[in-house]
Each structure stands twice: as structure tokens, then as C-alpha cells.
Image (spheres, helix red, strand yellow):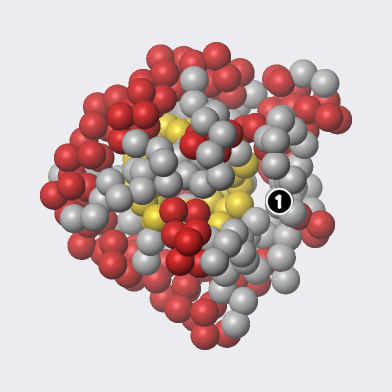
Amino acid sequence: MPKTTLHSLTRLKQEGTKATCVTSYDASFTQRINQAGIDIILVGDSLGMVLQGHDSTLPVSMEQMVYHTRCVQAGNNTALIMADMPFMSYRTVEQAMTNATDLMQAGAQIVKLEGGLWLKDTVNKLLEQGIPVCAHLGLTPQAVNKLGGYRVQGKTPEQAASLLNEAVELEAAGASMILLECVPTHLGKAITAAVSVPVIGIGAGPDTDAQVLVLYDLLGITPSKPARFVKDYLLQEGTVLSALEAYVTEVKNHQFPAPEHCFN
Ligand code: KIV
């Protein structure tokens, strides 16, 4: 299988072929993820919750993100590696530049930042220096305290219009991908149609260009109550590899996410 690139993902969007993404934090799971043919690996700061046992992603450090990105890179042959910039690691353009450099040197091909229009300058400057950015919009877990919990975003027409505008403006500023978390299906569809870069969704309905799940959710081993958008594939498949393969098949065949995984 040839290695996934930003260009190959854009081609999939243009063809209308769904892409797949899952989180990974180490080399062994990464090898299984490659075997299953998953296009993108997200070294997510969700590791703060599923590996470290915290109740949010806020305690995760840059040092830890670099370490786990190196582990994933060591096991990876075919997926595009996207690494999260953790909480407070991109307060200024200069800080973002230094920290994104560390993630790229650890093996990432793109970095993900959470936030809206305030990120425009950072996105622009990182891209100028050869660092592609994915803008994470909707439910942004690093802002959980401001948002008042892990809640669906963009429910009112005003909030939906504002999120759509953020996606368009961030693409114009140079974002190479958008990740949309926990938004109503109609908004996932509208944003995906409004931008030409690939849109990855989690709890954003079936119409985004790609789907992402946290690996431990997909394997049913996350200790907390699963969110509505989660499906436990290990329960139905029995092995890690076949669970990952079933996820790929269902996303590619438009069977996942089903209506019960989506928000109206
Ligand atoms: O950190 C992570 O795993 C994420 C996903 C929830 C998209 O950002």
C-alpha cells in the first residue's frame, strides 16, 4: 500500500472515496493499523485520558506528545501521521513554530491545533515554513472548561454559521485539513461541501470526507461511558486486526457512522 499523503487524501475527497483515521500512541498498534489499511494515524492528546487516566487532555505535555509521535513513527510504514499540539503549546506563533518543529522532527507530517479564527496567523506562518496544519473545530476538548463539558457544538443557526465561517477562513489562511468534532450532521455536511481540503469527522455525521475514532473506543477498552459516536468493533470481531479492518470496511461502504452515532 503506498504511503498516504495530503495530496492522496485530497484526491480521495475529489473522487468521493471515504478515508479512515484512528488514534495511535505506540509502534505495535501502529503496525496493526497499517495492516488494516487505515489512511491517517492521529497521535492524539486523548492519550492523556486513555493512557494516563486523566479526566481531560489538559495535563498532556509537549515532551509526551513528541515521545508518542516517535513511537508511532517507529512502527509506521503507510499512514499519514498527524500529531496533536497539546494544551497551551501554541499560545503564540513563535511558540507554535518551535513546538510544531519538534513534532515534525519526531515523525509527524501534519500537526493539529484546536481553535477558531484566532489561529489564522499561526496556521499561515506554520504552512509558510513547511508545516501543514489541521484545524480542529466544533467540540475542542482542550477548551472543555470554557465549553462547560463535552457537548455538541453548532446547534443554533448562529453557532452553525460561525463554525462554517471559521472552517472557510482557516482554509483560506492555509489549513490543509479540518477536523470536526461533535456537530450536527447537517453542519458536518455543509462544512465538508464548503471547503476543498479534506474534512475528518468524529460525531459529525456520515458526510465528512473521513472518519476518526479514538483507538481505545474502537476496541471498547476506554473505562468511561462511551460517547454516542463510538462503536466497539472488537466486541463484534474478536481480534484487534479484524476490528480495525471492519472499521475500514464500514467507513468505506458508508455504513459507519450509522444514524445512532450521529447528532441532529
Ligand atoms: O486527541 C484526540 O484523540 C482527538 C480526537 C478526539 C479527534 O483529537
What is the three-letter code of the residue carrying label 1? Ala
> Can residue 199 be seen at all in this image of the molecule?
no
- Residue at far right of view: 236
Q: Position of residue 99 (x, y in %)?
A: 23, 39
- Residue at (32%, 69%) from the top-left corner? 117
Vertical position of residue 248 compared to residue 119: above or below:
above
- Residue at (36%, 29%) from the top-left corner? 64
Q: Where is residue 172 in the image (x, y as percent from the top left)?
A: 30, 66
- Residue at (71%, 30%) from the top-left corner? 221
Q: Where is residue 147 in the image (x, y as percent from the top left)?
A: 51, 67
Closer to the camera in the image, 52 or 37: 52
Image quadrant holding the C terminus, namely bottom right
- Residue at (65%, 32%) from the top-left corner? 216
Disc 1 crowd, CA 10 A, few/some/many (<14, 14-19, 20+): few
Q: Position of residue 186 (x, y in %)?
A: 65, 72
Q: Name the residue under label 1.
A: 227
Figure disc tally: 1
**Relative to 206, is 20 on the left or the right?**
left
- Corner quadrant of residue 165: bottom left
**Relative to 218, is 141 on the left or the right?**
left
Vertical position of residue 145 compared to residue 237: above or below:
below
- Corner quadrant of residue 50: top right
